[in-house]
Image (spheres, rainbow, N blue to C red):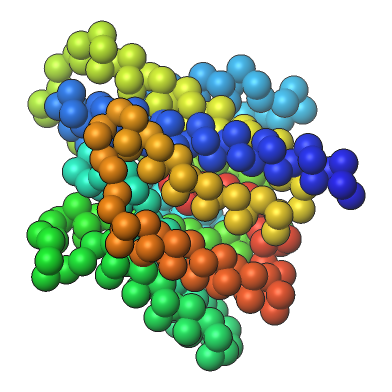
């Protein structure tokens, strides 16, 4: 058991570090004046490279098309591309730590959607965690003291679609292959972003192409890392590791974008992380969902 833990959890830390570096490169691409659709297309395109290069020999491409519940799989694709586009907008218009704070509202939205869609009972402790999570967001964003922009709404939208994706994965658990659930997001990302960028497309400059290409390759490697982590450790040990991205957001933001959070922001991030972890632990204790759904990112 310890051996599996030591194989899986470090892989998860590396995977989420790669995701964070990819998000920082997406922010840099925005600084270089790339559009949301252009960034989304090239990140999706380059993410295919490591996925193809490191694909297990036993997997066949036609397996991706074998869907037992196609309507829900396509809804997962729509939810994924929606969250992906909104995340690019959030990362290119907000400080990294602030964008992550909004995105990590996902556990709160999962709680709400679990009640509305799955009719799951939710106890008072989880509702207190929801309230605490919103309190953490208020400390980070501070409406009334700082300007609230469309980018903040985009970050909240990422959290909503991320939660919807988790609910869909719960519903699809056991019926669809991981390659199908991952492939549908790549397909939607390529098609939708290509159509969106086409009217005003100009071939990107080498520095911009390098930033988007590196972001895509890191994203692909990170997804592979999550698969390796899931094969080496129980899913309920891996999922909490995603909160390490808050640390990466603070470090990368400070090093490359001169974004240094103040004390109140640090306090809000801490409250938000504790709220999310408590929600996950309570949910795992009662329902054991993380052991029954594939470990996948909610967006590309």
Furthest residue toward top: 206
Residue in view at x 38 percent, y 43 percent: 250
Q: Quadrant of residue 260?
A: top left
**9 over 129 or under it: above or below:** above
Where does the image place residue 8, in percent across and percent down from the top left? 74, 41
Q: At 57% from the left edge and 59% from the top edge, which residue is drawn?
A: 169
Viewer-closest of 290 and 178: 290
Left or right: residue 12 compared with residue 216 = right
Residue lying at 49% horizontally and 70% vertically, measured from the top left: 275
Q: Above or below — where is 185 with respect to 73?
A: above
Residue in the image at 71% along x and 54% along y: 237
Quarter-of-image position of residue 232: top right
Q: Is residue 226 above or below residue 42?
A: below
Residue 111 locus on image (x, y percent)? 49, 76
Q: Quadrant of the C terminus?
A: top left
**x and y percentages locating residue 287 in the rendered image:** 69, 75
């Amino acid at each position: 058991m310890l051996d599996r833990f030591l194989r899986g959890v470090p892989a998860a830390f590396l995977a989420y570090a790669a995701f964070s570096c990819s998000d920082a490169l997406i922010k840099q691409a925005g600084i270089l004046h790339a559009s949301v659709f252009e960034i989304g297309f090239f990140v999706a395109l380059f993410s295919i490279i490591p996925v193809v290069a490191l694909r297990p020999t036993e997997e066949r491409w036609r397996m991706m098309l074998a869907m037992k519940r196609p309507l829900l799989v396509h809804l997962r694709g729509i939810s994924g591309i929606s969250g992906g586009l909104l995340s690019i907008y959030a990362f290119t218009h907000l400080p990294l730590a602030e964008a992550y704070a909004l995105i990590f509202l996902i556990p709160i939205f999962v709680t709400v959607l679990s009640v509305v869609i799955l009719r799951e009972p939710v106890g008072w402790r989880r509702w207190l965690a929801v309230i605490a999570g919103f309190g953490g967001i208020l400390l980070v964003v501070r409406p009334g003291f700082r300007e609230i922009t469309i980018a903040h709404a985009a970050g909240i939208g990422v959290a909503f679609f991320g939660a919807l994706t988790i609910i869909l994965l719960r519903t699809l658990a056991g019926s669809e292959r991981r390659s199908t659930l991952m492939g549908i997001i790549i397909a939607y990302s390529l098609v939708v972003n290509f159509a969106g960028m086409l009217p005003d497309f100009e071939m990107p400059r080498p520095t911009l192409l390098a930033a988007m290409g590196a972001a895509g390759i890191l994203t692909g490697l990170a997804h592979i890392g999550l698969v390796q982590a899931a094969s080496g450790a129980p899913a309920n040990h891996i999922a909490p590791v995603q909160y390490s991205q808050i640390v990466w957001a603070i470090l990368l933001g400070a090093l490359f974008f001169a974004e240094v959070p103040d004390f109140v922001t640090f306090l809000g991030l801490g409250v938000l992380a504790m709220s999310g972890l408590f929600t996950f632990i309570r949910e795992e204790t009662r329902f054991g969902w993380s052991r029954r759904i594939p470990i996948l990112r909610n967006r590309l």
